[in-house]
Image (cartoon, helix red, strand yellow):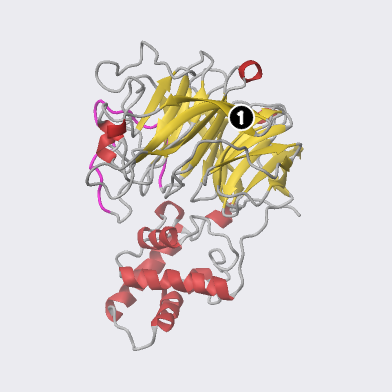
Amino acid sequence: MRYRINVWRILLFSPLAGLIFLAVQCSQASADGNANNGSDGNDRAAQLYDRYCATCHGTDLRGGNAQSLLDGIWQFGDGEGYVRRNIQFGIPHLGMPSYEGVLSEQEIRLLVDYLYEEQEKAGVVKPDPPDSLESIDYTLKCDVWVDNLDIPWAIVFLSADTALITERPGTLRMVVDDRLVEEPVTGTPEVLHEGQGGLLDVNIDNDYGKNGWIYLSYSHEIEKRGGQDRPPAMTRIVRGRIKELQWVDEQMIYEAPPETYRTTRHHYGNRIVFDKKGYLYFSIGDRGAQDQAQDPARPNGKIHRIRPDGSIPDDNPYIGEGLPTLYTLGNRNPQGVSVHPVTDEVWAAEHGPLGGDELNLIRKGVNYGWPVITYGRNYNGTIISEHTHREGYAQPNFYWKPSTAVCGIEFYQGKEFPKWENKLLVCALKYEDVRLLNIYEDRVMHEEVILKNFGRVRDVGMDPEGRVYVVVNEPDRVLRLSYLGERIGQ
């Protein structure tokens, strides 16, 4: 089976047709108001669909000018919240108009419920990955490498035939010779698996072959203090070794001051990377307290730099002014960090709110602006900041609007795909894709989607030969991309 990502699948409407269609529907809605003719919610939802959606998506929901809604593929986010916001705010740059001035909030919810009910009636499931894919440069073999995982979060290869995968509920899994070892690694840290928390990133020391150090990040809870309704938590980092599937020799590398722990259960970050100079960089999200991303006395909403043993470099920029581990300020929720294999520069991708996911070249002592400047807004459409630019705050090197829910990133290295060397692989949860970015100095020159709509893409990694491993959720598995042949790109 062959599979090609076609541009027409991405474009829901032509811009002109969308605007004309919206104008007609606004006129009809103005005449009708919000009147309900007495039919039940399902009948009302079907009427809304016929009036506002059928012209493009087909009277039977199976496509027309726009894509089918019964094929298991949601190009711009699968989930009630994603679909509702796409209808409410539109996707204007692709020609899909907004309906926030046409449909009430209740009508949009009815419509979204109707779409999912119709999908369930039709027995729709997400399609399996194809046997092959086409990118601009290569034909790729695509296979399910490991299946039936439990919310896999990150992957790292220890050798050509052995890899580690974290599962967010708290288990560390090993894959040997392309087979998932049945039993998880025992003795790993206890994690707080609530909300977005759990066992997060895994990486290995630059000198892993000599010292065997493996690094884990996770959400760590402490006892609740007076007036708190539940135990507070924060991102924590440890290192240890694995001997006969046992986690041993554990050392705590980073733990935030206990007074900075928060009772929220989201925006933990986190990624762990090493540069060639031996520094360890890691990210912590704002933990749902956006203003604290600007506070140097708080660990959240920042990129940190330490040494692999947890000691602190003397030239870290906020020593004496704030927490000594801080390297940057103003990062909302960075879940992708990678080091350029040639320049040794650190790049980070962070989730924006509704719009404004960012890719940043990380510089010592730089403030990246969240929430003082942002290209996004709150999920209900309200304003976070009036500013996208402001003196003293860095602009992103690239941003996505609408948000793709950007996640793990990794600069490509390996022999499998030489034309991709030093390009950046970028994962997206909401848009369920992997993108390949061509970066020159500090500029993104080109962006290409190489995989889409086979699960929420959490992380990406390479084995020593350069085959690409894609960690996805819903379904929880790892896909492998390998070489089938070269193509002549357009």
Q: Which element type, helix, strand or loop, lies under badge 1? A: loop
x and y, in percent, of residue 354 in the image: 36, 49
Left or right for 338, reference 123: left
Left or right for 487, reference 283: right
Asked if 484 appears above or below 124 in the picture, the reply is above
Q: In the picture, residue 110 is in which quadrant?
A: bottom left
Asked if 375 appears above or below 325 in the picture, the reply is below
Nearer-the-camera pick, 336 or 153: 153
Q: Does 389 appear in magenta?
A: yes
Q: Residues within 10 Å of mark 1 (few under 14, many from 20)?
A: many
Residue closest to the far top: 314
Q: In the picture, residue 225 is in which quadrant?
A: top left
Q: Residue at x 49, y 22 (%)?
A: 441
Nearer-the-camera pick, 189 or 319: 189
Q: Does 262 appear in magenta?
A: no
Nearer-the-camera pick, 196 or 303: 196
Q: Quadrant of the C terminus?
A: top right
Q: Is residue 389 visible?
A: no
Name the amino acid type tagged 1: Tyr
Left or right for 312, reference 343: left
Asked if 309 appears above or below 456 in the picture, the reply is above
Q: Which secondary structure dominates the residues rendered in magenta?
A: loop
x and y, in percent, of residue 139 in the image: 73, 42
How many marks can you see? Answer: 1
Q: Which residues are magenta?
A: 382-401
Q: In the picture, residue 317 is in which quadrant?
A: top left
Task: List the residue tagged with mark 1.
Answer: 412
